[in-house]
Amino acid sequence: MRSVAAQLLHRPPGLAPGEIVRRLAAMQAQDVPAAYLAFRARSATLTPADIDTAWHSREIVRTWGPRGTLHFVHADDLPWIHALTRRDTNILRRLAEEGVTGDDLLPLIEGALAGQGPLTKGDLEERLMGRARGQGVVHLVALAAYHGRAVLGPPRAGKPTYVHAADWLGAPIVPEPDRERALKELAIRYRGAHHPAGPEDLAAWSGLPLGAARTAWSLSPAPPPPAADKPVVRLLPAFDEHLMGWRSRDPILPAPEHARQVFPGGGILRPVVLVDGVIRGVWGRKGAQVSVRPFEELPDGLLDAEIADVRRFLAGRDGARS
């Protein structure tokens, strides 16, 4: 059984957003509201404002990370994460597909971003003056991110923003030059947050080739066993690290008919009900209203505290927007 304690789902007291991200190595953040709810699942006291503060203060940074997917990363960890996860093969192909070509693409996007603070895609389209539109703009930013020149800023009116790394962080991101050191750090962080696991799981989570994952594994000492799991009930958001962090989800989702309800296809991953480490249903929300679809009948009142806490957290989000 996967350890909910290693994943911080037992909600140890006193963890700030930055420490949660650091302890998980990175936190998937392609969907920002879901990522915020992942913090909630690991803390009984954090509010959306606390996460906003960590983001606006640059303690946590949203950028392309493991598997080339958007993650929150602790700012101190950017050099070694960047060294191991950056890649531009798909970026250049996607730019060509969007009709964005030329030998000046990096200086083009750098010039559009530099000194401007966070910009939306629409802002960048105007500044690029027709050189890129739509997803072509996003892929240009990804190219800049590959070179350590761009990250994502906090949303503006619900829309993603993009910002030059030097403007946001004080300097471009420079990848850790010692690959062995970066691999060791990756494995130490991953192994601390994922128990049990093996190099195959690390490869699946990080996007590294299996050979590199095995090297990383060999460089890192085995962490002490996590605290013994106690009964835990959690409403986990879509794309939570407890679902994304291993090669196989069978240990927490063994029934194929249930797997189809969680992963219906088309890249959709539904929020799940986790009971003592096993997925027992899916859930959703509309505003502050939470609806649960268990796979089988659950004890009366089992989810009451979790539903109330989701409402508490969402009320904080709504209050921050008012």
Image (cartoon, helix red, strand yellow):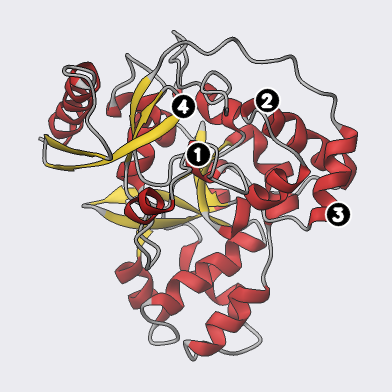
Q: Which residue is mark 2?
A: 192
In the image, 166 versus 230, the foreground residue is 230
Question: Residue 193's image quarter?
Answer: top right
Tell me which amino acid carries mark 4: Gly
Q: Which residue is mark 3?
A: 211
User: Label 2 near label 4: C-beta < 8 Å?
Assistant: no
Q: Nearer the viewer, mark 4 or mark 2?
A: 4
In the image, 83 versus 228, the foreground residue is 228
Q: Which residue is mark 4?
A: 277
Tell me which amino acid carries mark 1: Glu
User: Label 2 near label 3: C-beta < 8 Å?
Assistant: no
Mark sitting earlier along the chain (4/1): 1
Q: Nearer the viewer, mark 4 or mark 3?
A: 4
Whether residue 160 is situated above or below residue 309 in the rendered picture: below
Q: For the residues marked 3 and 2, what is the alpha-carbon distance in whole angstroms?
A: 20 Å
SS for tag 3? helix
Q: Is residue 208 left or right of residue 93?
A: right
Q: Nearer the viewer, mark 4 or mark 1?
A: 4
Whether residue 235 is situated above or below residue 124 in the rendered picture: above
User: Label 1 near label 2: C-beta < 8 Å?
Assistant: no
Residue at 43%, 29% (x, y): give it: 54
Q: Which residue is mark 1?
A: 241
Mark sitting earlier along the chain (4/2): 2
How many marks on residues? 4
SS for tag 4? loop
- Quarter of the image where the N terminus is located: top right
